Amino acid sequence: MRRLFFLMPDVESCQSVVAELEETGIPERHLHAVAGIEQRLDGLPEAGILQKTELTHGLEWGAGLGGVAGGLGGLLAMAFPPAGIILGGGALLTAAVAGAGFGAVVSALLSSHEHNHDLDAFQRAIEAGEVLLMVDIPRDDVAKTQEMILSHHPEAHIGVAKLPQTN
């Protein structure tokens, strides 16, 4: 999947782009609009916490680092068992899973308050009254979608980012 960033001059032109994209079969759950505080996004699919923050990135890193730390802790517990208890592979697996879960939760809590750095390039334009539309589409459809939007809306500024693998 790729994320296209369409920077539109106003809400009306963004609504027009959303309608065109929905006509081509792009579901509303793949459309995310971001505007300034004083702007209303009437009829536009507003971006949620996953698009506006680093939550997903935090979950990935927290689960990975927590899993490694838990696995190392499990290895230490197996190598130096407490009070003569014999520990097997289940203890290692349990420690790794518990560490991954703990790491994911802690990192998610911390990163849910950090803004999405992919939006930094658009911050000034959003504050100036423009509307950012993020569209998640398959990689093969990027060129076709860009061409379609620019043919009807030459005022649109487009950027592309790679999304993490999700289903």
Image (cartoon, rainbow, N blue to C red):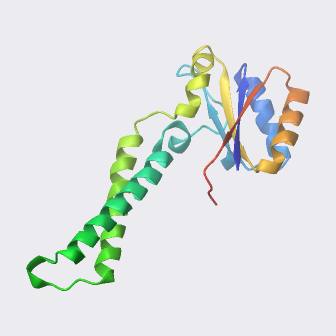
Q: Residue furthest right?
A: 151
Horizontal side of residue 104 vs 34, given as left or right = left
The percent coordinates of residue 132 (x first, y second) are 66, 28
The percent coordinates of residue 157 (x first, y second) are 76, 24
Q: Residue furthest front?
A: 79
The percent coordinates of residue 18 (x first, y second) are 76, 37
Which of the 4 quarters of the picture holds residue 160?
Answer: top right
At horizontal 85% and vertical 46% (from top left) the residue drawn is 24
Compared with 157, 115 (above or below) is: below
Compared with 146, 58 (above or below) is: below
Compared with 48, 16 (above or below) is: above
Q: Residue furthest left?
A: 83
Image mark count: 0
At horizontal 64% and vertical 60% (from top left) the residue drawn is 167
At horizontal 83% and vertical 35% (from top left) the residue drawn is 146
Residue 111: in sight, yes or no? yes
Compared with 11, 105 (above or below) is: below
Which of the 4 quarters of the picture holds residue 83?
Answer: bottom left
Horizontal side of residue 82 vs 40, given as left or right = left
The percent coordinates of residue 91 (x first, y second) are 28, 78
Residue 43: in sight, yes or no? no
Is 5 or 57 nearer to us in this picture? 57
At horizontal 41% and vertical 57% (from top left) the residue drawn is 63
Horizontal side of residue 25 vs 43, given as left or right = right
